[in-house]
């Protein structure tokens, strides 16, 4: 047991160090970047080659016919994310952001509210990571042009995306992993998470307006620009695919069809449809190539290696021990708070993999409250510190490239003030759901 715990702990420490320092190794005239998934991959290989994690266990875990199979979950998330990336490449999100800026006129408060609402709605039906990666450069652009402080909009966008991503199962890969592990259907998930998400969203908006009231009181001086999409036909095709895919995901549990089949099918259908459209319209835009290039392929080594590390912890009953330590009383508060904190120690995706194993040892009565609470913690932990989610890591990287000063200390100063009240509001909402 102890060697496995030590390797897992070292991986978590190295993961945090890699995220904070962004290290690289000099090789001649070049520098080889050390990615955030490097330590988990090395840790997983160390477990396998040392014999602590038998190949038979690895094979059975990766080829399991159950819905918690990490390969199925990766296919589900990446294919669903591809639909969102395509809509961004087609210009839909930038068009909507332009409409928001035009509608706000000179009021920063109005612009903030419009952007918060827009990011929230888009996140519900797409993915928090994609919305953050799309809107962050746009916010940096218009803030510089209008000579206004970008921080309220950047942090507001980040908070909105990582709050409303709780609403549907497709909003975050952690939702998918934890919900599938607990055998939760699309419809049941939404029924349980709607109220906690609304409570959290309102609390987040209130805290943001309170904290940023002074900079938002200043007027906007940006010149008006007419928003436009790049290709209406492609946008229509993309929206139709996303809408029908979402509807089928809702009814998937009733027809006995696994969700990853649906998302993969629609991703393939989208690429076929767009190729046909490009041939008919004689369009040479490399939109599909750009879409594939932006897909979150780095999740594959990260999720698989963390899955194997957690599998080893489960093999030696470490996750069962953690479950016993947490107990079964007050599962919403215990698992909500512990998952929130754990996400900021090991990142929210490894946390989701670990907590899916920990909650599996609970009784049927405590399983569902604990699983939903862990989902809340995995989403809201993202804006407690930048380590809480991959979205935070990528977001901080974009700000650095765009020349926006936003230190780790400043992030935490905002994160602590906003995330804790929002977490309490969300867990209170979930308590009401299970009470009635």
Image: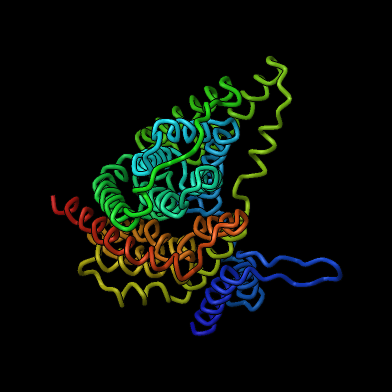
Residue at image point 54% right, 77% down: 13
Residue 175 seen by the camera: no
Give whichever of 406, 36 is nearer the camera.
406
Residue 284 seen by the camera: yes
Q: Is residue 238 above or below residue 189?
A: above
Q: Is residue 315 above or below residue 378?
A: below
- Which of the 4 image quadrants contains residue 182? bottom left
Residue at image point 29% right, 58% down: 422
Residue at image point 32% right, 58% down: 211
Looking at this view, name the residue that lies furthest to the bottom.
Answer: 2
292 left or right of 414 in image: right
Q: Is residue 424 above or below residue 326?
A: above
Percent across and percent down for residue 143 are 50, 46
Q: Is residue 16 above or below residue 229?
A: below
Percent across and percent down for residue 125 are 42, 37
Give whichever of 253, 37 is nearer the camera.
37
- Which of the 4 image quadrants contains residue 279? top right
Percent across and percent down for residue 118 are 40, 38
- Which of the 4 image quadrants contains residue 57? bottom right
Percent across and percent down for residue 344 are 44, 68
How are the residues colored? rainbow
Looking at this view, name the residue that lies furthest to the top.
Answer: 280
215 left or right of 63 in image: left
Label count reads 0
Residue at image point 65% right, 19% down: 277
Looking at this view, name the residue that lies furthest to the right.
Answer: 28
Give whichever of 231, 56 is nearer the camera.
231
């Amino acid at each position: 047991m102890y060697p496995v715990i030590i390797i897992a702990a070292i991986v978590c420490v190295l993961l945090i160090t890699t995220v904070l320092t962004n290290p690289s190794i000099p090789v001649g005239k070049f520098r080889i970047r050390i990615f955030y998934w490097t330590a988990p991959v090395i840790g997983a290989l160390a477990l396998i080659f040392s014999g602590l994690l038998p190949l038979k266990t690895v094979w059975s875990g990766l080829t399991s016919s159950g819905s918690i199979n990490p390969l199925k979950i990766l296919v589900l998330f990446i294919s669903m994310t591809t639909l969102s990336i395509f809509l961004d490449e087609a210009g839909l999100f930038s068009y909507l952001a332009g409409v928001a800026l035009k509608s706000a006129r000179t009021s920063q408060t109005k612009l903030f509210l419009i952007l918060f609402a827009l990011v929230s709605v888009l996140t519900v039906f797409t993915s928090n990571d994609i919305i953050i990666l799309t809107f962050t450069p746009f916010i940096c652009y218009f803030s510089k042009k209008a000579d206004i402080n970008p921080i309220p909009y950047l942090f507001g966008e980040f908070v909105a995306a990582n709050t409303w991503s709780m609403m549907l199962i497709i909003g975050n890969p952690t939702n998918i992993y934890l919900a599938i592990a607990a055998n939760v259907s699309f419809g049941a998930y939404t029924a349980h998470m709607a109220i906690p998400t609304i409570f959290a969203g309102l609390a987040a908006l209130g805290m943001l307006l309170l904290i940023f009231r002074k900079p938002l009181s200043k007027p906007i001086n940006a010149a008006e620009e007419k928003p436009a999409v790049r290709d209406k036909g492609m946008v229509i095709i993309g929206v139709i695919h996303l809408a029908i895919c979402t509807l089928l995901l809702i009814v998937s549990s009733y027809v006995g069809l696994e969700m990853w089949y649906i998302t993969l099918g629609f991703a393939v259908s989208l690429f076929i449809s767009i190729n046909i459209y490009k041939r008919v319209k004689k369009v040479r835009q490399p939109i599909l190539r750009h879409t594939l290039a932006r897909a979150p392929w780095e999740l594959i080594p990260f999720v698989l290696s963390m899955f194997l590390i957690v599998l080893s912890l489960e093999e030696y009953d470490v996750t069962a021990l953690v479950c016993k330590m947490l107990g079964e009383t007050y599962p919403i508060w215990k698992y909500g708070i512990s998952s929130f904190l754990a996400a900021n120690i090991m990142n929210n995706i490894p946390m989701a993999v670990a907590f899916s194993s920990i909650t599996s040892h609970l009784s049927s009565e405590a399983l569902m409250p604990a699983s939903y609470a862990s989902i809340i913690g995995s989403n809201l932990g993202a804006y407690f510190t930048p380590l809480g989610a991959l979205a935070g890591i990528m977001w901080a990287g974009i700000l650095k490239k765009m020349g926006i000063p936003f230190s780790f200390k400043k992030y935490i100063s905002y994160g602590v003030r906003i995330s804790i009240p929002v977490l309490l509001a969300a867990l209170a909402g979930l308590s009401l759901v299970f009470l009635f």
